[in-house]
Amino acid sequence: MHPAPPLHGAPLLPEKEVAALANELSGETAKRNLEGLARFHRQRGSQGFHAAAELVAERARAYGLGNVQILEFPADGKIFYGTQRSRPAWDAEAGELTEVAGDGFETRIASYSAEPIVLAEDSESADVTADLVDIGDGSEESGAYGGKGIHGEDVSGKDIRGKIVLTSAPAGEVQDIAIGKFGAAGIVSYAQNQKTAWSGENDNLIRWGHLTGFSPHPTFAFMVSLKTARAFQARLHRGEPVRLHAQVKAGQHPAAYEIVTATIEGADPTLKNSEIAFSCHLDHQRPGANDNASGCVTILEVARTLQKLINEGKLRRPARTLRFIWPPEIEGTVTLLNARPELATRIQAAIHMDMVGGGPDTKAVFHVTRGPMSLPSFVHDVAWAFASWVNDQSYRFAAGEAADYPMIAPEGGKEPQRAEYSPYEVGSDHDVYQDSSFGIPCIYLNDWPDRYIHTNFDTAANIDPTKLKRAAFIGAASGYFLAGFSSADIAPTRRADEVGKLLRAAAVLDSGRDVAGLDEYERGVSDTVGRFASWRPSLPRSSRPIRPGSSQPSSSPNRSKSGAADVFRRRAEPRGPMMVFGYDYFADHAKAAGISIPRLLDYEGGWGSGAQYAYEALNFADGSRTMRQITAALSVEFGPVPEELVREYLEAARKIGVVD
């Protein structure tokens, strides 16, 4: 229970608690921890990931957190955790790419020991000397492997067998065709993934690359900059041979997913079995500072601050338990919630941080991202109440006005925070929590765009301690408020929801949609406030109640003649999103069943991608909506979509055993 806040403007929490958090949270402490994590090349199951996990666990113990563990779950490429096919661990010891001159002298092009990002994840050991051949985007239609090129030019003489290919495509996308079909010896890629308005401006950037973990054609791949690739292309165009020597010592091996977890136990004898989870992802390439050492150290700083203030009596111990989780991205969260179903039952809400520290040079915009419309919840409005307050306080300070809590870190910037309250986007662990398999509402704090994401320039130098402090405050205040939430907090929370409702309506009106389409969602948001206060882990999760006016269908509903009135329901197993990390459950099972990939996955709506339509189509298949109602709900959320595409997708999901 939280007393009413004072009139100075701080939302939801009393000023003494706001002041305690603002004074204790340290962007500098978070950045020092970030500098430690950024030393490690943190691939899943690797020695670098283990070292990072040990560092986090050591810090958590030093901060006095309880139940600090590094959980281990076997990963061998065969075990499934819900929709996640476990990926074997990948480690690398060495990787050198050199150019061989006519006199035998070798010039280094890329070195794993100097910059681990140059060796694509899941590369296998090799010792190859071969000529380089440019295959462009690597598609057969482009004439990359002989025949007529995309512009009709004759490229029939091109032969890549035994050669190393240079491609603009991600290495994993050309692996099976270039290596498996045409016999190439290896890959050099300059793929420009994660494109932004700044893509290509800095031609020294080297982007993180991946091979396909489950490909029947294992190989190696090196990642190079645009500058290096263009120099190769110019020489090849002049007819000058380029001969490369690739030495790699790396490979997959059975190991385990490692997930660090720690808790601050709740005070209420019953409610302590309910949890508010803080999430991030510990993996990624070195240095991986904003993505995602920033999220990892920020939830660690939240944990340190809350534990210290509780110990000192400056904050009351909340009723519910606070849990902190550091997994590999997406696959670790899917694994954890499937392997430890009691946690999925206990977690009442989550706060996920993925990239929260980008300074001005990254060009990042900070977002408080709402949940999907299939899972209405007030928790996003709680986070926005704190974020908009920080916006206001930091702007007042930057503008030379009086501000009690500008949240400035001594070593950080003084720029105002301009966080945006943004509609749902897929792409990180928040997708897992909010998937209908688990139905856990999740606050998502994230930077986008970031011009250095997944590159060798994603360094600690680009991280702003002030940004870390502000993100930590929004997360800490939101999590602490939710952990202590009681019936006394319902009234002020409803005021925050009214603000959120107006913002959502404004966004809908601005896009030309009918605001009436939000009515069902807003009723759902309002309903969750009272349910949250009374929820207990022993009760079934009621995150997706039967819609008003509908009734629970039988287990085998009649099929309508037109199909518009058919009702679909997601099965209890397998649990998790269809597209996880390094594995596509839907595509793999559709291929095995001889089903073509549904057109919905490539559909582009007014403000949503095919992946978002597909994700929500399964979530809306809750056993109460008809096909027509699912289509209507998707159209409200992401823009108009033909019903036939939705039907095709859900029929394919039925054939692979995902829905009834």
Image (cartoon, rainbow, N blue to C red):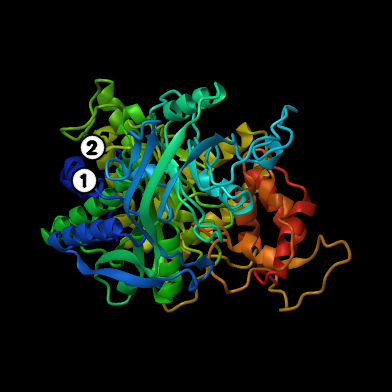
Do residues under tags 1 and 2 come within 8 Å of each other at their CB atoms? yes
- Residues at marks 1 and 2, CA–CA distance in whole angstroms: 7 Å
Residue 650 on image: x %, y %: 71, 62
Q: Residue at x 61, y 50 (%)?
A: 611
Residue that carries the numbered disc 2 in the rendered image: 465
Q: Hey, which residue is sitting farthest front in the picture?
A: 103
Q: Residue at x 47, y 66 (%)?
A: 531
From the viewer's perspective, is 410 left or right of 42? left
Residue 451 on image: x %, y %: 41, 32
Q: Residues within 10 Å of mark 1 (few under 14, many from 20)?
A: many
Q: Hey, which residue is sitting farthest left in the picture?
A: 312
- The image quadrant that residue 623 belongs to is bottom right
Q: Amino acid at mark 1?
A: Ala
Using the rendered image of the protein, determine whether residue 485 is visible from the camera's viewpoint: no
Image quadrant containing the N terminus: bottom left
Q: Amino acid at mark 2?
A: Pro
Q: Residues within 10 Å of mark 2 (few under 14, many from 20)?
A: many
Residue 27 on image: x %, y %: 21, 41
Front residue of 448 and 345: 448
- In the displayed structure, 35 sits above or below 557; it is above
Residue that carries the numbered disc 1 in the rendered image: 30
Q: Residue at x 33, y 71 (%)?
A: 72
